[in-house]
Image: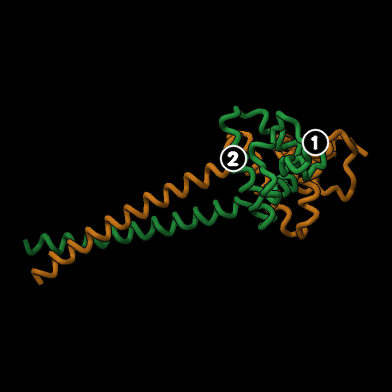
Chain colours: A green, B orange
Amino acid sequence: MNPTKRCAACKYLRRRCPKDCIFSPYFPPTDPDKFACVHRIYGAGNVSKMLQQIPVQARAEAVESLCFEAKCRVEDPVYGCVGIISLLQTQIQKTQSQIAQTQAEITIAQTQSSQFM
Amino acid sequence: MNPTKRCAACKYLRRRCPKDCIFSPYFPPTDPDKFACVHRIYGAGNVSKMLQQIPVQARAEAVESLCFEAKCRVEDPVYGCVGIISLLQTQIQKTQSQIAQTQAEITIAQTQSSQFM
């Protein structure tokens, strides 16, 4: 067992990396921060438990979304990625007002246009 | 110590609820699911650790966002609330195309209108 071949998770947890390691396909040793971040927010046990409950083919996407949420929570401990949802919702509301206004303008312009046609 | 006065977290963890319980202001005994959900995703220790690192006046909001993320993760184990972010981003892209189209239409209408003025 070559310790340099351990995945980032097993390296972080200072354990040997088993052949069927649940973390190793998603946490390469070249990116140690990725595991450190999810470990800090969820804990290794919870991440492992969550991955076990997900079909293998969906695990890579689950890891990406967990890492994204964990990174957001580290950067914004109060709102995490819910802060992004709020920002996007505000942006949608503004854009919807903009559409309503633009549609009102188009109605006026079309009315003016039809008066002369 | 009246056990019925324990907060939802201490009740869930089967422990006495201390006077300075970090969970009790945010997890009333009337809503046991709220704690069960964050406990399932983050674990009680991580939630407690995260709350301790946040100023008291921001903790209620942090609990709400953690509960929201946990609920999303329980409902959608692969994407969690990142799925909502993707949906909102798609909605914004659609709306932006709609605006561009509407703005093109208004330009046409205004041009037609100005030809007759």
Residue A76 as seen in the image, left or right of residue B81:
right
Depicted A113 relative to depicted A86: above or below: below
Q: Quadrant of residue B7?
A: top right
User: Which residue reaches farthest bottom?
Assistant: B117
The amino acid type found where label 2 is placed reads Gly
**In the figure, is residue B58 to the left or right of B82?**
right
Residue A86, quarter of the rendered image: bottom right
Q: Which residue is painted at 53% across and 57% down in the image?
A: A87
Which residue is drawn at the image coordinates 33% and 57% (left, top)? Answer: A100
Name the residue nearer the viewer: B69 or A28. A28
Q: Where does the image place residue B4, in percent across and percent down from the top left?
A: 85, 35
Q: Crowding at label 2, few (<14), some or many (≥20) Cα neighbours within 10 Å?
A: many
Q: How many marks?
A: 2
The label on residue A26 is: none
Quadrant housing the N terminus of chain B: top right
Instruction: Residue under label 1, please give it.
Output: A16
Residue B110 in percent (x, y) is at 18, 66
Q: Residue at x 24, y 59 (%)?
A: B104
**Secondary structure at numbered mark 1:** loop
